Amino acid sequence: MTQLPQGQVAVTHGRYDMRTVVMPGPLNGSELRGRKLFYGRCSMCHVHPNGPWVDQTTAQAMREDMVLKKIARGSERMPGYQYSLKPAQMQHIINYLKTVTPNQKPTSLPGWW
């Protein structure tokens, strides 16, 4: 490695893959709203490594209408959100869950948890 005189900067040129540069983000508007709602309402339990993980396989196995009912009514261990979330907001959460893959499950807690 060549040492540059003090005050000079080395510039390295490379080629951009323009297909990657112009590729849209991974989530659409509904999925982004769902992610925000999920992390605001659901993540305390559903992102915890020992908690009930939910992802696209869960959403597919339960069927969308049953996931909507579960979010609205809750269960013994989960609060229902029928009075605090609108149906469209619950649908946003489902749309987000459809993008979550099983390999995204955390294996340890983040430092702030």
Image (cartoon, rainbow, N blue to C red):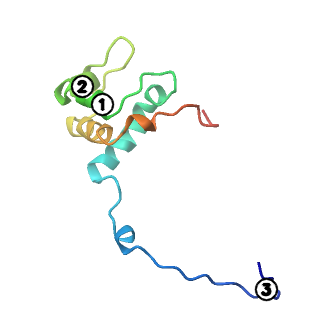
How far from the left and from the top, in percent, is residue 12? 61, 81
The earlier-in-sequence mark between 2 and 3 is 3
Q: Residue at 69%, 84% (x, y): give it.
A: 10
Q: Is residue 91 visible?
A: yes
**Label 1 environment density (alpha carbons within 10 Å; few <14, some 14–19, many ≥20):** some
**Mark number for residue 4?**
3
In what element is the residue under mark 3?
loop
**Mark number for residue 61?**
2
Residue at the far top: name it. Answer: 76
Kind of residue at disc 2: Ala
**Cα separation between marks 2 and 3:** 60 Å
Left or right placement of residue 14 versus residue 36 in this view = right
Task: Give the vertical position of 16 relative to 96 (above or below).
Answer: below
Q: Residue at 51%, 21% (x, y): give it.
A: 50
**Cα separation between marks 2 and 1:** 6 Å
The earlier-in-sequence mark between 1 and 3 is 3
How far from the left and from the top, in percent, is residue 40? 43, 37
Kind of residue at disc 3: Leu
Q: Is there a contact, CB below 8 Å, between mark 1 and mark 3? A: no
Left or right placement of residue 95 versus residue 40 in this view = left
Q: Residue at 37%, 43% (x, y): give it.
A: 35
In what element is the residue under mark 1?
helix
Q: Nearer the viewer, residue 36 or 17?
A: 17
**Cα separation between marks 1 and 3:** 54 Å
Quarter the C terminus occupies: top right
Q: Nearer the viewer, residue 109 or 80?
A: 109
Q: Is there a contact, CB below 8 Å, between mark 2 and mark 1? A: yes
Residue wearing tag 1: 57
Quarter the N terminus occupies: bottom right
